[in-house]
Amino acid sequence: MSGGPILVPILGDQLTRNLASLRGRTKDDTVILMMEVWDEATYVKHHKQKIVLIFSAMRHFAAELEDADWNVDYVRLTDKDNAGSFTGEVARAVERHDPRAIYVVEAGEWRVQQAIEEWPDKFACEVEILSDDRFICSTAEFRNWAEGRKTLRMENFYREMRKKTGLLMADDGNPEGGEWNYDKQNREPPSDEMDAPGRPLFAPDDITQECIDLVEEKFGGHFGSLENFGWPVMRNQAEEAADAFFAERIEKFGPYQDAMVHGQDDLYHSMLSTSINLGLLDPLELCQRAEKAYADGKAPLNSVEGFIRQIIGWREYVRGFYWHFMPELQSRNALNAQRGLPDFYWTGETDMRCMADCIRTTRDNAHAHHIQRLMVLGNFALLAGINPRDVQDWYLAVYADAYEWVELPNVSAMILYADGGKLATKPYAASGNYINKMSNYCKECRYSVSKKTGEGSCPFNSLYWHFMDRHRDKLESNHRIGRIYSTWDRMDASKRQDYRDTAEAFLETLTPASKDWARNQ
């Protein structure tokens, strides 16, 4: 066996000093390998800001490690011998350093993990694959929780995580305030008095500017703008962004977390998901800060519970769900949706004001909040019957916080109901009424939300009934939406046909996007 060092590959979403593969290592006996590789930058054509964010955060983290006297072997995208893949770069590093062992933390994405699991057979040294204990619930723990259950309700999982962490739990073992979930208090429509403070933006330093120049040169044809780039790329910046959220926005985060306002892209959202998913912020520490804000009387229970539920509920749940159902989840299409993704998802050129605004903020910021993603952009894709793989590629490409483990369950199972109901208890389908209630989009839209059918009617209205009608055989028995068909049946035949004709006429106007928008062909 070689007497060489321990080689520790760190992936682009593992940027934390507390990584399992680093704990217990000594600086004189460890080589940290960090790699910018073409495979990861191009397996979908990621938003320009997403590539800049990951590369800049990686380079800043490498510099931080070097300042702390760690031996860092950093491979840049433009290095002339770059192998283009994680496995290829680890092979080159093995040649350079002759390590006695490789310690690596399991990957977040299925395809990367499959490659890592081949390393023990590819390299002569020992390879130890460690669990990613930055998550509260391990994949094995999730499998044990899911075993034998007829339904995998997130709410039940969330309660288990509350008990495990002790977050918002009273001394008697009951949830703080007597309720587990305060979501009913968190559905306020936008108010004219809303004046959300802007989130901190971080001007590009030399390292980030170098990454911006690289992306413009190498990935100039990718979706998105770099003009507004201001994401945190270092832990101290991420902590400053967290400080601002807890000081200025958490109080109103809960009530207005579902609201949508034209031109107000951030509202009261934390905007911390990019930093959490990169490893710059610890999710449990954030939840503990939120809990303290409630204990100190600085934030109401409904806001704090809603924030905590997003992290130890949804985030942990979708990660477990992803690993439990992969790789089959990628190809599920329970509703047999076959329509190509419309080109306006990339261009933003549509008269539907809600869609145009959500696509605009996606293009400009590599971000849209969860209701914009679910109930506008996703709702349209569901109603129009867009092919799940096209929609999955789009969401994975365009959002700075999107990694497949979090994107795929949310898109395939939550948004598109493509898994047939393992995650969601019903399709999240809605007419224009929902968008009108929760936003100010409809006021100046060319389409009338009050008009149900015919020329100038809101497309969401007819598409909603068209969706329900064509999937009646699959959905009518669902107890959560079965009553909708009673409403449909009470309509006279001519009205039902008007809905069908209006929807079909609108669908005929959609132009499918070129496939090479999302993937290199």
Image (tube, rainbow, N blue to C red):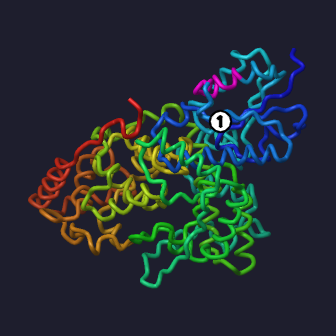
Judge by depth and name the residue closer to the eye, 86 or 227.
227
At a point 67% along the width and 38% down the height, the residue shown is: 11
Disc 1: which residue:
107
Name the quadrant of the C terminus.
top left
Drawn side of residue 134 relative to residue 464, left or right: right
* Residue 436 found in image quarter: bottom left
At a point 35% along the width and 56% down the height, the residue shown is: 429
Count of numbered tags:
1
Question: What residue occupies the far bottom of the structure in this picture?
Answer: 193
Local secondary structure at mark 1: loop
In the rendered image, residue 451, in percent from the top left (x then y), is placed at 18, 69
At a point 62% along the width and 30% down the height, the residue shown is: 79
Q: Is residue 85 magenta?
A: yes
Q: Residues within 10 Å of mark 1 (few under 14, many from 20)?
A: many
Drawn side of residue 389 relative to residue 279, left or right: left
* Residue 90 found in image quarter: top right
In the rendered image, residue 83, in percent from the top left (x then y), is placed at 60, 24
What amino acid type should be assigned to the residue bearing mark 1?
Ala
Name the quadrant of the N terminus.
top right
Above or below, 478 against 219 in this view is: below
In the rendered image, residue 458, in percent from the top left (x then y), is placed at 23, 64
Judge by depth and name the residue closer to the eye, 56 or 149.
56
At a point 39% along the width and 47% down the height, the residue shown is: 416
Q: Is residue 329 magenta?
A: no
* Residue 372 found in image quarter: bottom left
Judge by depth and name the residue closer to the eye, 320 or 34.
34
Can residue 334 be spotted in the picture?
no
Q: Which residues are magenta?
A: 81-92
